[in-house]
Amino acid sequence: MAGGGLAERFERSRVGQTLIVGVITIVLLSEVGTHLPDSAFQRSVEPTADRIIHWAGSEQTWAVFAPNPRSISLQLGAVVTFADGTTTTWRMPHGSALGANLRFYRWRKWLESARADAEWQLWDPTARWIASLYDDGPSPVVRVDLIRRFHENLVDGPQPPWAAYTYFTLHLDEP
């Protein structure tokens, strides 16, 4: 294969490979730096390491592991209201039961942020994005209600019903 694109030529060059290895090394060291036991060293590297892993999009928490895994199941949905008075419910993509875990994991991670009170700055863009999914519909979107759904997980037996409430409403101008 002759040539290749600019990205491929960069990746094959010594400079490109050195830069790629350098970025990967910095991100991995940053991950380690944010998960060190509490110490003066950890507190000194954590602010910079946090910025790096945020930039790289590799933030992670270990809340699914002992001793205190999260005991609540979460869902995010939206009720979309159109100018003609009809509504529809948007739900996060979840994929098939087989093989979808990795493909749809990003949606579950996004859910944790998009519904969190501390991430309120994501609510308006999330609602606008959901509204944009219906741009080609017969009636324009006039309102999007973001809905949190949750329930406490039981170890066995049937799970309790979902509790739900609207945590953000976006009103769009009618045409």
Image (cartoon, rainbow, N blue to C red):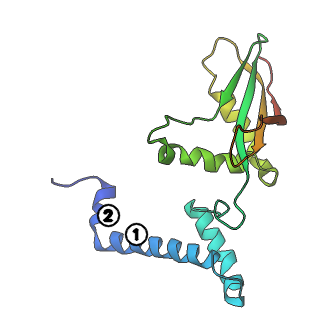
Query: Based on the displayed image, in which of its 4 quarters is residue 127 positioned?
Result: top right
Label placed on residue 161: none
Q: Quadrant of residue 80?
A: top right
Is 43 rendered above or below residue 134?
below
Disc number at residue 20? 1
Left or right: residue 72 compared with residue 23? right
Residue located farthest toward the front when viewing the structure as drawn: 157
Which residue is disc 2 drawn over? 11
Residue 36 occupies quadrant: bottom right
Secondary structure found at label 1: helix
Judging depth in this view, the residue of 22 and 175 nearest the camera is 22
Looking at this view, name the residue that lies furthest to the bottom. 40
Q: Where is residue 119 in the image (x, y as percent from the top left)?
A: 77, 52
Residue closer to the observer: 48 or 173:
48
User: Foreground residue, 140 or 99?
Assistant: 99
Residue at image x 57%, y 62%? Answer: 58
Residue 94: image location, x then y, percent: 56, 36
Crowd class of label 1 (few under 14; some 14 to 19; many from 20; radius 10 Å):
some
- Tell me which amino acid carries mark 2: Glu
Mark 2 touches mark 1? (CB < 8 Å): yes
Q: Residues within 10 Å of mark 2 (few under 14, many from 20)?
A: some
Left/right placement of residue 44 relative to residue 102 reads right
Q: Is residue 162 above or below residue 81?
A: below
Q: Quadrant where the C terminus lies?
A: top right
